[in-house]
Amino acid sequence: MFNWLSLVTGLFYIVLGIVVIIYKFFFTILEPAVAYGLGALLILYGVFRIYRAISKIKNSGDEK
């Protein structure tokens, strides 16, 4: 269950990163350079979470 929740959380981070880049807002108005950097960081973290969740799901399937 935790692995699937981590997968959904990763998707949420990717969407949040895209929203930050488009609207340049994250609790306050951001400068464009900061918005792009923060958005990219959120997207990369989302991809990392999804990768880690998928690898754990595959490993748990191999053990059974």
Image: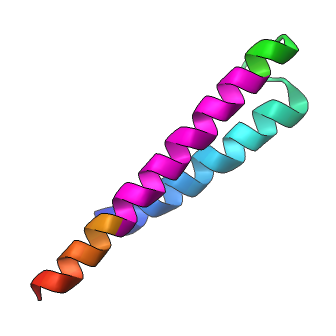
Looking at the image, what colour scheme do you see?
rainbow
Numbered-mark total: 0
Split into 4 quadrants, where in the image is the C terminus? bottom left
Q: Residue at x 60, y 35 (%)?
A: 42
The spot of residue 47 in percent (x, y) is: 53, 51
- The magenta stretch spans residue 45: yes
Judged left or right of residue 50, residue 12 is: right
Q: Position of residue 14 (x, y in %)?
A: 64, 48
Task: Classify residue 29 by image quadrant.
Answer: top right
Residue 24 in the image, given as x and y percentages of width and height:
85, 24
Task: Residue 28: name its quadrant.
Answer: top right
Q: Which residues are magenta?
A: 36-54
Q: Is residue 60 left or right of residue 47?
A: left
Left or right side of 63 for 34: right
32 is higher (above) or lower (below) than 42: above
Furthest residue in direction left, as rendered: 63
Give the main secondary structure of the magenta stretch. Answer: helix
Against 55, residue 52 (above or below) is above
Q: Is residue 7 magenta?
A: no
| Res 1 seen here | no
The quarter of the image holding the N terminus is bottom left
What residue do we see at 80% from left, 14% from top?
33
- Residue 56: image quadrant is bottom left
Does any portion of residue 42 appear in the rendered image? yes
The single residue placed furthest to the bottom in the displayed view is 64
Above/below status of 17 relative to 27: below
Residue 18 x/y as whole percent? 76, 42
